[in-house]
Image: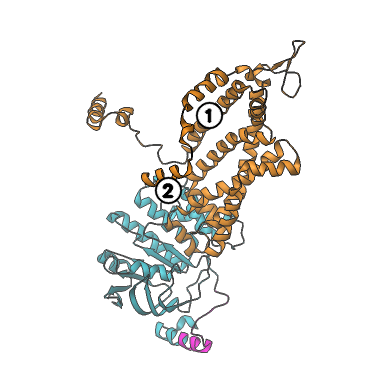
Chain colours: A orange, B cyan
Amino acid sequence: MILIAWVFIDDLVDDWGQVEGAPEKLQTFFTEDLLPPDWSVLEAEEWSDGSLHKPNGDICDENFELFCSKAWTGMVVTIKMAFVATLVGFFFSIPLASLAATNMAPLPIAIPARVVLAGLRSLPSIIWALLFAIALGFGPLPGILAMTLYTIGYLGKLQYEAMEGVHNAPLESGMAMGLTHSEQLFHVVIPESSNHLLSQLLFMFEYNVRHGAVLGLVGAGGIGMYIDNYINPPFDYNKAFALLIVVFVVVVIIDLISMMIRSFVTEEGDVKRPKWWSVILPPSMAVEMYSESEEE
Amino acid sequence: MLKLLNRNDLLALNRIILRSHGVGCLVVENPPSRGGDNVQKLDSESITLRGLTVGYDEALVLDINKTIYPGDTIAILGASGIGKTTLMRTIAGLIRPLSGEIFHDYPRRGGIGYIPQRLGLVRHSSVRSNITLGARTRRSKWYPSWYPLDSSLKEDVDNAMKALKIEDIADEPVRILSGGQQRRVAIARTLVQRPRIILADEFLGELDKDNVKSIITATKKIVDEIGATLVLIEHHEERAIEIADRIWRIVDKKLIEEGDSNQ
């Protein structure tokens, strides 16, 4: 397999000479353009008369200057956009996914449903955003619509695969009992795959927040719009880098929240977790340390 | 009048009905109502298996010709992998027979209660939600799936939990329950459904004697009350003889009836 991969990459890359000097070029870019990140993006805009303003020009009357900064206001818009898109996308993707899952619907229904979902996710959200920006103009609305459509396609695929992983026994009991498709969906499949569905929903929210940074490139609003401003002339890369760090921090926070929420539906709650040394140390040493800690 | 007839008379009567339909299939357009306190045993045959061959790619049990009467308790015995579960799944309508036919007049919704080997419970839902699912089949299929049930059905759910002594764990998720408790939940769910036939695949499993006794007592009491037919797969022969009044044994791809086990 590795050999095949090597043959493919050798076929695709014509000029291996372009690798030459790459680390130096990157080093220059990092040291001269990106680093240090310019944290002024966490401050309100100061006008010539000394007053503080929000990015839209309103006077900053918040208790903390951070709340008037580009990073905060941009991130809040992006999170709102991602929240709406994820939620609306989820409500549409669940029924579609239930029609696409082969253990819930016959193939003549499952295949068209899969085609619809594949169609929605085969256009990247940035292309959807471009189409909506052409139709509706710039702003958060085309961004929300783009994210929603992409969410339906992407989340729908993850969901029907999770649904197909549900044990047969409860589904068969339901089928024998004569439960309807929606009863099976609401009362059997959703509870049984709740861990996966919840994790996918939270992942999709995180994905949409990250993607908010990209959608700004086509004028879809949010933090991406500011990043787009900074990576265009006059090239404030260190400000863009600071905003990307903000996005990263938000993604990490979402991941931690996701872990907390999912703990309500996973079966790991009462399981004794392994100690750190059982993961890092060789087995013999880990066992020794474990027995010592048990004695304590 | 039909209540005065014995089984042979009923069988003969049914044959006449079948012939008169010409297609060999007994169809009752408006089946007698289930549920409530006035449930009555049907005076027609429960279920007829005619020339039934079951299996997947390969036939496991050949040419079954049997009739299951209302109120019967039948135990299916046989070695592992011989086709007991396949036969039960075929009767439940989950897989197509390789040949032959199954005749019954059960309503598609709620007429059959099936307890698979792995119980088929929704592990992440509470005991109450699982049992409510059984009660839900007593409402029309157009009843919105997100609507809560009305108070009479909720009362039935509570009564079923009381009968099986699981009311204390009503709000616990099924996944944290012991094997015995899970079995009680599965039975309560099927009983509150008030099906015409209960198909239970090794539902007593490896339970201890006391648990088996109390579950059988509770089950038989409610099965008698609702007038359902009970077909179960059992590995323990003595237990099967104790519970059932008819024993079906699968040997060499044939289904043999051993007659009334209480004789």
* Residue B210 left/right relative to A248: left
Determine if residue A80 is in view. Answer: yes
Which residue type carries mark 2?
Answer: Val
Judge whether B165 appears above or below A282 on screen.
below
Report the span colored magenta.
Answer: B14-32
Residue B39 or residue A162, whichever sits in front: A162
Residue B239 or residue A76, whichever sits in front: A76
Real-space Cα separation, disc 2 to disc 1, in angstroms: 32 Å
The percent coordinates of residue B158 (x first, y second) are 49, 52
Residue B31: in magenta span: yes
The percent coordinates of residue A241 (x first, y second) are 58, 24
> What chain is tagged by disc 1?
A
* Secondary structure found at label 1: helix
Mark 2 — residue?
Answer: B174
Q: Quadrant of the C terminus of chain A?
A: top left
Residue A293 or residue A277, whichever sits in front: A277
The percent coordinates of residue B40 (x first, y second) are 50, 72
Residue B243 picture quarter = bottom left
* Residue A98 left/right relative to A65: left
Judge whether B47 appears above or below B124 on screen.
below
How dense is the environment of label 1, judged by Cα within 10 Å: few (below 14), some, or many (20 and up)? Answer: few
Residue at 26% x, 25% y: name it. Answer: A293
Which residue type carries mark 1?
Answer: Ile
Disc 2, disc 1: CB below 8 Å? no
Q: How many marks?
A: 2
Residue at 33% x, 68% y: name it. Answer: B84
> What chain is tagged by disc 2?
B
How dense is the environment of label 2, judged by Cα within 10 Å: few (below 14), some, or many (20 and up)? Answer: many
Mark 1 — residue?
Answer: A253
